[in-house]
Image (cartoon, coloured by chain):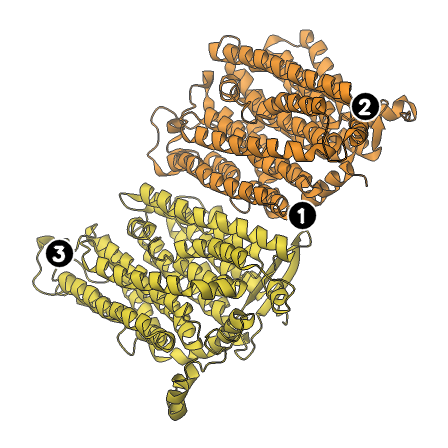
Chain colours: A yellow, B orange
């Protein structure tokens, strides 16, 4: 673990510093508040790209590590990234400027507070992804809640207060039990430091009795599963996503849900491997129910934003399923799906938000035939919808495909059921598109709607480029994840006895799927554990 | 034999904060006739000087640690830590009182003198190493607060609160005194360490403690439980806290609680260390009751002051979770929690004082609607204190709760794990009512009846101290946590 300057600290706290700059401005100086927020978030994105330059994808250790004593001896300020968190940090820094740009004109009240909240969320989310100390992680984890709570409650739609309270009580309930588990873990391990705890476990100095392990796993998993959200804990999500302002939905769906799946991958699996394997079956079943149920409920929605919200339940089910397949390909697919869902669903919410800005409704009935008055916006919308329903070669396809392949190796039935979700997603998205964009213009008001403005075109084009890039250049991402994913798998299977069936930690990754290795790749993929 | 410490001067140095407080209390009263009625506020500043000097003089006591007055009082790092906490609360409360008394037209010297005397009583309680001395400290602080609670003489609510507090409070102190008498009857001494030694000898081979001693401890728990507002002795608290002038409520909810927890720790942890098996369960039961009654009670309130009263009951419950740990770490966690608690609680009450307006007419949660847009800074401060009370990271309240959980889980005992889980569930119940105030302030349309109120300088200073303390303890708790651990260590010399 080499120390490479203070890059992660800078990335984590740059938005917080820009909050200071924004606070210095007068509240009615809306133009400059927006400009500074945008400039800060763009600068943040550029700085975060530096991570890519220094990142060594062959190194299984955490990189850009910073480690200082914070509270006493046991609580440290310990940051670092690996191939998993790296891209999630980039996803965050990529989506924040977009979220700021999409709120340019739709937010009129208390503009200062809005952008301050947005930047605070960015700091907190990046903090979650780079923390390697459980205490520090928990601090950032909880800090994401309050700005999001304000964002839904102050700038949301009609039922915003209900949605905000539901959101925060749900997530807090999960996290407080996780806090208890974290403190308990400290009682056993004597440290909050994740790598240190894992090292203690590897060397056999720290062993949990099965029941204890299961309870601790449960406390962590509940917090993450609520965040993901895993069926049946998903009921906060449709309300929160629907009532939040566009930027809030983009951040919620784009990044915040991934805090849950990231947490499962980073903490639940390596810390409690036995329990994770024991619980894999029921969790996978819940994930599959979520995939199918989310898709079915999405089909019957009459509210466009709610429809998009339910697609998240379905898509995140894929991620959880991929994680609990315990093999390299599936987990790479899960991580890729996190990124791609962040971009695609974020883009869907952006499109829905643009419609809302024009008509102030999410009712599908109020739309129809929109392709005639606004061809550009609707073309982008179609492109985004296609990416979300996993059309090759766009991003959605890569993630779902890898997850299905990986899962298929473990459990045929799981993969088959999950695949039905992919079919259903085509139904709800294309049908929604048909009802909104195709045919005659059904509502008189819609005939004169303006097409996408320059600002909106920039936003949509950026998202489209990102979608295409993720889809076409997916090996650039998966290659950098592979070592870290194997590392996690190794930790997850390390303490298990050999008799239990488990995928080899060194199962061939996505590299095995590349054409020049095709002959062996097929053979390798068929190696059953 | 009790060693006689060297010289009167040393005694006074070890008691420096109390000496300064009493001195200024008397100066304020003597100066009263010489100050014109319209300028009584000056006396408030004089009292403030006294409180700040007392805070500074803690340094003197810290310089000469050791027993004072035949070992009746200890100036150890435990009592030093608590003196700083208590006096910080007093300073903030006086800052918050200055404009309040003007507004209510009760600007009088007695108020400030009583606050200083009450603070002296709390100081004695925090340092007391002997039960009768503790009783004297408790009475000094209690009697001053009985009067303070009824200080808005023309308000029936204030009078009712005062009478209620006086009658029930006298009962409680009587319980405490009976308890002391029984302990004396068993052990023949009232010094904290001597009781420990005597009880250690009285314990039978199979670990039984004489029944009379346990009865005495039970009575002491009733008396002290009343003062720290622990269920089932909390009945009086919401009424009294609601009826008292708000700055007095701020003081009541912080100072006596801190001081009484100090003597409780000394009695339970040191004197009755050998009876831990007995009082552990009593504390656990009290903790569970306190948390649930506090939080469920707060859930139903529409009055901010009453809600904060119930919330302070709930916080006593969280502190009892750390108390039940029965370790040095538990004591350190209690001390840290008390420090964090004082800043957030007094801060919250100072804001309620400020927003209350004349005759405290603006106390309903609903009256705060739209505060976020009308008075963004006040609303932001209030949110900070509420979030800290709720226990959100980056605030003192979170770190306090974290240390409390850590202390309780540090002992491998199933009951304690259950206790922590109950505390966690209660935190979620708490989240609902704290957040409800934030919803009202930020998410609802502004209230028409109330125009924005300018924040006077004194209130602003109090708020800055409270907010800075809350954030400091939340983000950089290291130093205070070290001090708390040292203080806890000084209780257990071996």
Name the residue tied to disc 1.
B478
Quadrant in which the C terminus of chain B appears? top right
Does mark 1 fall on the same chain as mark 2? yes
Tell me the crowding category of disc 3: few under 14, some 14 to 19, or many 20 or more residues within 10 angstroms, Cα based.
some
Q: Which residue corresponds to the image point at 67% horizontal and 10% vertical from the top-left?
A: B32
Name the residue tied to disc 2.
B72
> Is residue B466 toward the left or the right of residue A312 in the image?
right
Q: Quadrant of residue A296?
A: bottom left
Q: Is residue A386 above or below residue A16?
A: below
Q: Which residue corresponds to the image point at 34% horizontal and 79% vertical from the top-left?
A: A472
- State the SS at label 2: loop
Spatial separation of the CA atoms under disc 2 and disc 1: 32 Å
Q: Which residue corresponds to the image point at 48% horizontal and 28% vertical from the top-left?
A: B454
Q: Is residue A226 above or below residue B184?
A: below
- State the SS at label 3: helix
Subunit bearing disc 1: B
Spatial separation of the CA atoms under disc 3 and disc 2: 85 Å
Q: Tell which tag, 3 or 2, sits nearer the viewer.
A: 2
Does mark 3 fall on the same chain as mark 1? no
Name the residue tied to disc 3.
A446
Quadrant in which the N terminus of chain B appears? top right
């Amino acid at each position: 673990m080499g120390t490479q300057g203070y890059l992660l600290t800078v990335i984590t706290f740059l938005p917080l510093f820009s909050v200071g700059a924004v606070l210095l401005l007068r509240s009615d100086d809306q133009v400059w508040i927006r400009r500074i927020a945008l400039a800060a978030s763009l600068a943040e994105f550029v700085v975060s790209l530096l991570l890519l330059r220094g990142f060594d994808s062959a190194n299984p250790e955490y990189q850009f590590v910073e480690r200082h004593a914070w509270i006493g001896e046991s609580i440290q300020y310990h940051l670092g990234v690996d191939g998993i968190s790296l891209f999630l940090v980039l996803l965050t820094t990529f989506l924040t400027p977009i979220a700021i740009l999409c709120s340019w004109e739709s937010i009129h009240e208390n503009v200062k507070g809005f952008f301050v909240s947005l930047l605070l969320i960015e700091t907190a989310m990046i903090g979650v992804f780079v923390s390697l100390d459980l205490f520090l992680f928990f601090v950032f984890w909880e800090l994401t809640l309050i700005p999001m709570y304000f964002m839904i409650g102050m700038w949301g739609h009609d039922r915003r207060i209900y949605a905000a309270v539901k959101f925060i009580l749900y997530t807090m309930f999960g996290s407080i039990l996780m806090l208890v588990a974290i403190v308990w873990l400290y009682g056993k391990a004597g440290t909050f430091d994740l790598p240190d705890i894992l090292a203690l476990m590897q060397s056999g100095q720290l062993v949990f009795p099965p029941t204890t392990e299961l309870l601790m796993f449960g406390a962590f998993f509940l917090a993450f599963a609520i965040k993901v959200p895993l069926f049946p804990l998903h009921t906060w999500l449709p309300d929160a996503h629907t009532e939040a302002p566009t930027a809030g939905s983009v951040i919620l769906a784009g990044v915040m849900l991934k805090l849950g799946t990231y947490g499962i991958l980073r903490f639940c699996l390596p810390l409690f491997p036995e329990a994770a394997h024991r619980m894999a079956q029921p969790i996978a079943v819940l994930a599959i129910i979520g995939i199918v149920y989310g898709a079915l409920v999405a089909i019957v929605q009459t509210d466009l934003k709610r429809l998009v919200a339910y697609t998240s339940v379905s898509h995140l089910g894929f991620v959880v399923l991929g994680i609990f397949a315990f093999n390299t390909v599936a987990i790479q697919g899960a991580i890729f799906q996190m990124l791609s869902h962040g971009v695609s669903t974020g883009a869907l919410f952006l499109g829905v938000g643009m419609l809302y800005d024009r008509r102030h409704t999410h009712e599908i009935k109020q739309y129809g035939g929109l392709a005639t008055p606004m061809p550009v916006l609707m073309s982008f919308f179609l492109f985004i919808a296609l990416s979300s329903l996993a059309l090759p070669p766009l991003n959605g396809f890569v993630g779902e495909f890898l997850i299905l392949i990986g899962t298929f190796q473990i459990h045929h039935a799981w993969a088959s059921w999950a695949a039905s979700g992919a079919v259903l997603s085509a139904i709800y998205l294309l049908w929604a598109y048909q009802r909104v964009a195709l045919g005659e213009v059904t509502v008189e008001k819609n005939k004169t709607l303006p097409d996408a403005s320059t600002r909106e075109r920039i936003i949509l084009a950026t998202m489209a480029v990102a979608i295409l890039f993720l889809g076409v250049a997916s090996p650039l991402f998966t290659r950098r994840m592979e070592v870290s994913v194997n590392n996690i798998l190794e930790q997850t299977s390390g303490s298990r006895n050999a008799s239990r069936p488990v995928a080899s930690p060194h199962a061939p990754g996505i590299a095995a799927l590349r054409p020049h290795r095709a002959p062996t790749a097929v053979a390798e993929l068929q190696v059953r554990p | 034999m009790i060693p006689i410490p060297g010289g009167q001067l040393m005694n006074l140095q070890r008691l420096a904060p109390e000496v300064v407080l009493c001195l200024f209390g008397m100066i304020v009263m003597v100066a009263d006739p010489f100050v014109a009625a319209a300028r009584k506020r000056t006396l408030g500043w004089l009292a403030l000087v006294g409180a700040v000097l007392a805070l500074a003089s803690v340094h003197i006591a810290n310089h000469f640690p050791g027993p004072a007055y035949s070992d009746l009082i200890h100036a150890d790092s435990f009592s030093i830590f608590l003196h700083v906490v208590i006096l910080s609360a007093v300073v903030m409360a006086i800052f918050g009182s200055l404009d309040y008394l003007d507004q209510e037209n009760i600007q009088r010297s007695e108020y400030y003198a009583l606050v200083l005397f009450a603070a002296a009583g709390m100081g004695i309680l925090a340092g007391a190493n002997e039960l009768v001395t503790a009783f004297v400290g408790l009475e000094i602080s209690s009697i001053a607060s009985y009067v303070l609670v009824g200080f808005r003489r023309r308000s029936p609510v204030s009078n009712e609160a005062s009478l209620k507090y006086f009658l029930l409070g006298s009962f409680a102190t009587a319980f405490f005194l009976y308890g002391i008498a029984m302990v004396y009857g068993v052990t023949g001494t009232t010094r904290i360490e001597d009781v420990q030694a005597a009880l250690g000898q009285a314990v039978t081979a199979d670990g039984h403690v004489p029944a009379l001693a346990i009865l005495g401890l039970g009575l002491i728990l009733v008396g002290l439980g009343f003062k720290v507002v622990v269920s089932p002795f909390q009945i009086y608290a919401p009424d009294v806290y609601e009826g008292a002038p708000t700055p007095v409520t701020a003081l009541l909810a912080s100072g006596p609680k801190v001081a009484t927890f100090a003597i409780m720790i000394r009695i339970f942890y040191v004197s009755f260390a050998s009876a831990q098996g007995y009082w552990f369960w009593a504390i656990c039961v009290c903790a569970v009751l306190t948390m649930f009654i506090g939080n469920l009670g707060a859930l139903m309130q529409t009055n901010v002051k009453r809600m904060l009263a119930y919330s302070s009951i709930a916080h006593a419950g969280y502190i009892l979770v750390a108390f039940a740990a029965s370790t040095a770490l538990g004591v350190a966690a209690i001390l840290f929690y008390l420090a964090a608690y004082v800043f957030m609680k007094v801060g919250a009450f100072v804001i309620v004082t400020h927003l209350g307006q004349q005759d405290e007419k603006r106390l309903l949660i609903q009256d705060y609607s739209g505060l976020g847009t009308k008075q963004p800074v006040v609303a932001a401060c209030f949110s900070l204190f509420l979030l800290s009370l709720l226990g959100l990271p980056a605030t003192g309240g979170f770190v306090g709760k974290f240390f409390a959980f850590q202390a309780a889980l540090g002992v491998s005992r199933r009951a304690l794990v259950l206790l922590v889980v109950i505390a966690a569930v209660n935190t979620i119940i708490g989240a609902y009512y704290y957040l409800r105030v934030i919803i009202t302030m930020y998410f609802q349309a502004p209230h028409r009846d109330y125009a924005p109120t300018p924040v006077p300088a004194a209130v602003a200073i109090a708020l800055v101290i409270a907010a800075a303390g809350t954030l400091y303890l939340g983000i950089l708790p290291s130093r205070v946590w070290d001090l708390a651990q040292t203080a806890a260590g000084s209780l257990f010399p071996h």
